[in-house]
């Protein structure tokens, strides 16, 4: 089974009002008193207070959050504040997302976009498009998610919104990650990281480090991955982001439990992360951690306890219709039944997992399901079913082998071309050596010729000089002879 897919429970909104982290009856009473004070306010001040209260209630009571938000929206609509109405609707969409009601979240985002368009608030539109993409990503509708992210990115580029661009780029990278295109995912993460470093955005920087850690983990760079997760956790702690801190803490637990053979340490981090998720109210996050606890218990042979955690996780995922989570949990249950020797039970869960994976186009589960189903049917003696899944497994193997052969052929062609170039280079070098030797020969020959010519000139000069001397001597003799006569 591939490493766990990236934990992407991120809502990207800018300039969020201050949220009140409240829990317990005392905190609820404190928020209620704020609500009563808001009744004495008027106009925009009253609406903004109600919006802040709605977001404060988000952490403790969705019903109160919804009621307060709708109350704020009614005032905004009555006063004709379309921009503020869009802001409230967007906030309600975030609240709906937090509790996993994705259909309601989409409705709110759609209405918010309509309100923002009336006042030409491009930033508000981009935020809602981005959040809509996030919803479709979680529900497994990847093509829609990409479309909304890219539409959001276009507006952010036009506005020069660097943070918005980085967020959209990161989430497109997340989609590549979920499709196992880790190199492309990493390219997008680093592209977003360059923007974020310049802006010193602690939250987004932490998210990017966490996602980069997940890619390193897929590539079995365990130490690098752990370092990235620890860095992310520290950044989230600095920014006071308990939601994200829980995610990073969970990933640290995964490293210890699955890669470093320290299950007790891993379980400790799991429980810390689960406590944080319960505090912030993150059902899919809690479900994911419950699955990991189940896997840890299954590895230790504690099957009953493992199934208890899996079923709690499945209930959470099904309640919010989280496609990837449901498919993943069915796979874990099927795999654990196989380990426990419950082959018929394993077949039932794996068949369900495979069917849902095809429905939601989660191809990363296909090979693992086919392989385990093949093994289950071999154990139960069902030859026909075994042959069917063996055939599917074989096709996947053949496809992988074919890809490997293509790579090998490309590599062979490259090596041949390299050898060919090397041969040409060697031949060229040999020719160059020959030319160099010939050039040297001609240089020496020329030097010798020059020396010879110079010598000849010198000889001729000396001979001429000698002849002249002889002539002068002869003339002197003749003159002497003439004088004596």
Image (cartoon, rainbow, N blue to C red):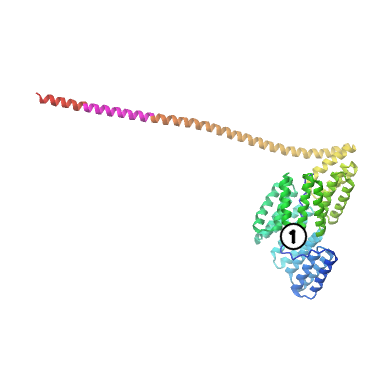
- Provide the secondary structure element on which disc 1 rests: loop
Q: Is residue 146 visible?
A: no
Please name whichever residue, 398 or 184, is drawn nearer the observer in this view of the structure: 184
Residue 73: % across, % down: 78, 69
Q: Crowding near pointer 1: few (<14 within 10 Å), some, many (20+)?
A: few
Which residue is identified by label 1?
240
Q: Give the image location of residue 160, x and y in percent.
A: 65, 60
Q: Is residue 456 above or below residue 18?
A: above
Can you give x and y, in whole percent of width and height, for residue 222 in the image?
73, 45
Q: Between 175 and 63, which is closer to the camera in this rendering?
A: 63
Counting the numbered discs, the total is: 1
Q: Is residue 478 above or below residue 362?
A: above
Residue 364 image position (x, y, % from top left): 78, 46
Q: Please indicate whether residue 167 sits to the left or right of residue 301 in the image.
A: left
Quadrant the C terminus occupies: top left
Whether residue 5 is in magenta: the answer is no
Q: Quadrant of the N terminus?
A: top right
**465 drawn magenta:** yes
Q: Nearer the viewer, residue 336 or 427?
A: 336
| Picture residue at 58% right of the left edge, 35% below the top | 421
Specify the quadrant of the image occupied by residue 91.
Answer: bottom right
Q: Which residues are magenta?
A: 448-469
Q: Is residue 18 visible?
A: yes
Principal SS element in the magenta part?
helix
């Amino acid at each position: 089974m591939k490493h766990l897919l990236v934990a992407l429970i991120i809502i990207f909104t800018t300039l969020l009002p201050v949220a009140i982290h409240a829990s317990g009856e005392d905190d609820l009473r404190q928020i209620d008193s704020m609500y009563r004070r808001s009744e004495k306010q008027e106009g925009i001040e009253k609406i903004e207070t109600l919006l802040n209260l709605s977001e404060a209630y988000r952490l403790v009571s969705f019903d109160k959050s919804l009621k307060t938000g709708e109350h704020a929206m009614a005032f905004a609509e009555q006063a004709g504040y379309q921009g503020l109405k869009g802001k409230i609707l967007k906030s309600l969409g975030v609240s709906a997302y937090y509790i996993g009601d994705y259909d309601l979240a989409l409705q709110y985002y759609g209405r918010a976009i309509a309100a923002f368009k009336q006042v030409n608030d491009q930033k508000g539109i981009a935020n809602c498009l981005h959040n809509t993409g996030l919803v479709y990503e979680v529900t497994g509708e990847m093509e829609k998610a990409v479309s909304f992210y890219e539409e959001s990115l276009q507006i952010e580029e036009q506005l020069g919104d660097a943070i918005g661009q980085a967020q959209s780029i990161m989430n497109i990278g997340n989609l590549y990650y979920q499709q196992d295109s880790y190199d492309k995912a990493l390219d997008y993460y680093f592209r977003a990281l360059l923007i974020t470093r310049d802006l010193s955005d602690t939250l987004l920087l932490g998210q990017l480090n966490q996602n980069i850690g997940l890619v390193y983990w897929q590539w079995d760079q365990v130490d690098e991955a752990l370092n990235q997760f620890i860095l992310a956790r520290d950044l989230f702690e600095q920014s006071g982001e308990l939601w994200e801190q829980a995610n990073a803490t969970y990933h640290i637990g995964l490293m210890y439990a699955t890669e470093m053979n320290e299950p007790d340490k891993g379980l400790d981090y799991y429980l810390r992360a689960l406590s944080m998720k319960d505090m912030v109210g993150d059902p899919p996050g809690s479900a994911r951690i419950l699955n990991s606890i189940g896997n840890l218990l299954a590895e230790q042979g504690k099957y009953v306890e493992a199934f208890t955690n899996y079923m709690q996780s499945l209930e959470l995922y099904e309640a919010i219709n989280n496609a990837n989570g449901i498919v993943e949990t069915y796979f874990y249950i099927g795999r654990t039944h196989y380990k426990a020797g419950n082959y018929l039970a394993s077949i039932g869960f794996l068949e369900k997992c495979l069917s849902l994976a095809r429905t939601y186009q989660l191809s990363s589960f296909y090979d693992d399901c086919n392989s385990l189903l093949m093994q289950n049917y071999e154990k139960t003696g069902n030859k026909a079913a075994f042959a069917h899944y063996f055939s599917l497994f074989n096709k996947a193997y053949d496809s992988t082998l074919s890809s490997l052969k293509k790579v090998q052929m490309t590599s062979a062609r490259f090596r041949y071309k390299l050898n060919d170039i090397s041969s040409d280079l060697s031949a060229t070098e040999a020719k160059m050596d020959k030319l160099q030797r010939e050039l040297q020969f001609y240089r020496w020959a020329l030097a010798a010729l020059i020396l010879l010519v110079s010598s000849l000139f010198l000889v001729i000069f000396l001979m001429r000089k000698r002849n002249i001397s002889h002539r002068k001597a002869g003339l002197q003799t003749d003159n002497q002879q003439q004088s004596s006569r």
